[in-house]
Amino acid sequence: MKAAPAQFAVPLVAPAVDLLLVAALLRGQLAATLGYYLLFFAVDLVLSAVAVLLEGEDLGLLKGLFVQRIAYRQLLWVALARSLWNAFAGLAVGWGKLARTGSATVGTAEGKRD
């Protein structure tokens, strides 16, 4: 299955939109920027609703979308940027498994004897 361009575009530009909103707040230009921010959020909301419906889930999951996007969006951007960078660079990325050292010990519960 091919990934839709919006699947990568929205998360990639989202932090820039957040920074522009903060810059507008600091410059006192909230009214000029608020419309564009709300439009961007509306597009994000529609795409999220489509994803929820395609998964057969309840639309009630979208209640906390605004707060979730503000708090989680920056972490999502870092993960997406790293994965795209590795994909374009052709780097193989593993699961990050820990090396087995055999140093774990297993104790027995008190009162039980084998």
Image: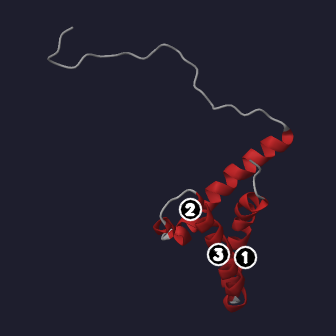
Examine the rendered structure and indicate whether residue 62 appears above or below residue 1. Answer: below
In terms of secondary structure, where does tag 3 sit? helix
Q: Which residue does the numbered mark 2 point to in the structure image? A: 52
Q: Amino acid at mark 3?
A: Phe
Side of 53 where 3 appears, left or right: right
Verify CB contact (< 8 Å) between mark 3 and mark 1.
no
How packed is label 2: few (under 14 Cα within 10 Å), some, or many (20 or more)? some
Number of numbered discs: 3
How packed is label 3: few (under 14 Cα within 10 Å), some, or many (20 or more)? some
In the rendered image, residue 24, in percent from the top left (x then y), is placed at 70, 83
**Label located before the other in sequence (2 or 1):** 1
Q: Which residue does the numbered mark 3 point to in the structure image? A: 41
Examine the rendered structure and indicate whether residue 95 appears above or below residue 103. Answer: below
**Label located before the other in sequence (3 or 1):** 1
Verify CB contact (< 8 Å) between mark 2 and mark 1.
no
Measuring 78% from the left and 48% from the top, which residue is drawn there?
Answer: 84
In terms of secondary structure, where does tag 2 sit? helix
Kindly indicate the quadrant of the structure image that contains residue 109: top left
Position of the C terminus by quadrant? top left
Q: Which residue does the numbered mark 1 point to in the structure image? A: 20
How packed is label 1: few (under 14 Cα within 10 Å), some, or many (20 or more)? some
Measuring 52% from the left and 58% from the top, which residue is drawn there?
Answer: 56
In the rendered image, residue 83, in percent from the top left (x then y), is placed at 73, 45
Q: CA distance from mark 3 to mark 1?
A: 14 Å
In the rendered image, residue 73, in percent from the top left (x then y), is placed at 62, 61
* Front tag of 3 and 1: 3
